[in-house]
Image (cartoon, rainbow, N blue to C red):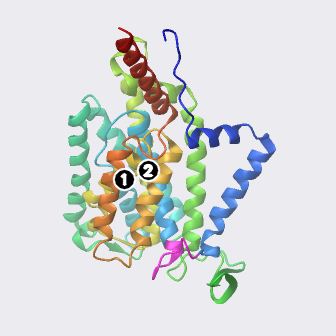
Amino acid sequence: MSGSSVVAKPTIRQSFSARVAALPKPVKIALWVGLVVLLYLLPVLDPPLLSTPDTNFGGVLFTVATYSLVALGLNIVIGYAGLLDLGYVGFYAVGAYTVAVLTSEHASWPLLLAVPVAVVASLVSGVILGVPTLRVRGDYLAIVTLGFGEIIRLVAVNSEWLGSAAGISNLGKPPSIQLFDIPHLSWDGIVASVDLDDTSAFLVFGVVDRTPYYWLALTILLLVLWADILIKNSRVGRAWEATREDEDVAELMGVPTFKFKLLAFAMGAFIGGLAGALYASKQGFISPNSFLLLFSILFVAAVVVGGQGNRWGVVAGAALVAYLPERFREFTEWRVLVFGLALMLLAIFRPQGLLPPRRSVRARRLDERLGAIEGRGQTNA
């Protein structure tokens, strides 16, 4: 039996990826365009199996898009650079409060001017936090970032110019463009009809229909995904991967690990602040209770559930974390318990996440092969 090789059976995901990779390039482009169009049409179609009871489906989709945006930013920190950040909600809060202060009656800035300031403020806060703290590793870094998230919330609670515990209301909204009405399909069994009584003007950002907010968040999410793909395939992405796998070896190979860790922290903070700015604009009101430690835990859960290091995995994980509690809202007393149990089962039976990165799949298959070969060697001996 010596010299025999162990051939692992390809998984469903690997078979599907191979089939997609074999398709002609025009077909791939058509599939991606069709998927994007479908995502934009989801609040219009309002499919019965996906729509949430007693809630504005466009608002739920906005939450999903925002969580996905946050998960992409946190994935840069945790999945790419290997830094455990438990206070990511702090950057989310910095972006939201910057928009709140600038667009409310305190300054009355237009939102389009306030959002760039908000993301820059979040980026600066990431650099300020990262310079002294990124020299520690592991659990110590997690504790420091956890404290940062709580400090931001407590500063908001005790600062009158930030509204204290009462928060800030009457925030600015994106400019509206009235072109045509947004139709919404009304489903009766398997027959769909257009509900003309439930329409809202195109890109009117208000409280009646959250669809324009979802379209705005989805557009920003797609742009961030495109930028994430470019940077992950660049020299920066390779430096992050080397730092995550073994920081000491990366230093010996000439990689300035501190600089690249700080860059990951700053980029994660930038995206987190952008998501917070979108959230504040859509809510029209924020308070310290909007940025509890629970949200940091949910953000980390989205990354871990989806598969840290895989951008598509963390987007899927964020969609599940944001969508499932709303989908089963009728189980008011039990939905959080069921959601927690589902996360526990996933951690036990699928610890690598729903869609682990290819490096994790390759490493696990290599371990299985080595284990099988060692077992055969012991048997032959």
Q: State whether residue 250 appears in this view.
A: no
Q: Is residue 322 visible?
A: yes
Residue in view at x 55 percent, y 54 percent: 221
**x, y percentage for residue 169?**
36, 75
Residue 218 position within the rendered picture, expressed as x and y whole percent measured from the top left: 57, 60
In this picture, is 195 found above or below 52? below
Residue 363: mark: none
Q: Secondary structure at mark 2?
A: helix
Question: Compared with residue 82, is residue 56 higher up or lower down, i.e. above or below?
Answer: below
Q: Which residue is mark 1?
A: 299
Image point 54% across, 34% down: which residue?
232
The amino acid beneath tag 1 is: Phe
Query: Which residues fall within the magenta stretch?
Result: 48-59
Q: Where does label 2 land, which residue? A: 71
* 1 and 2 marks in contact (CB < 8 Å): yes
x and y percent of residue 29 in the render? 75, 47
Label 1, label 2: how far apart the Cα atoms are: 6 Å
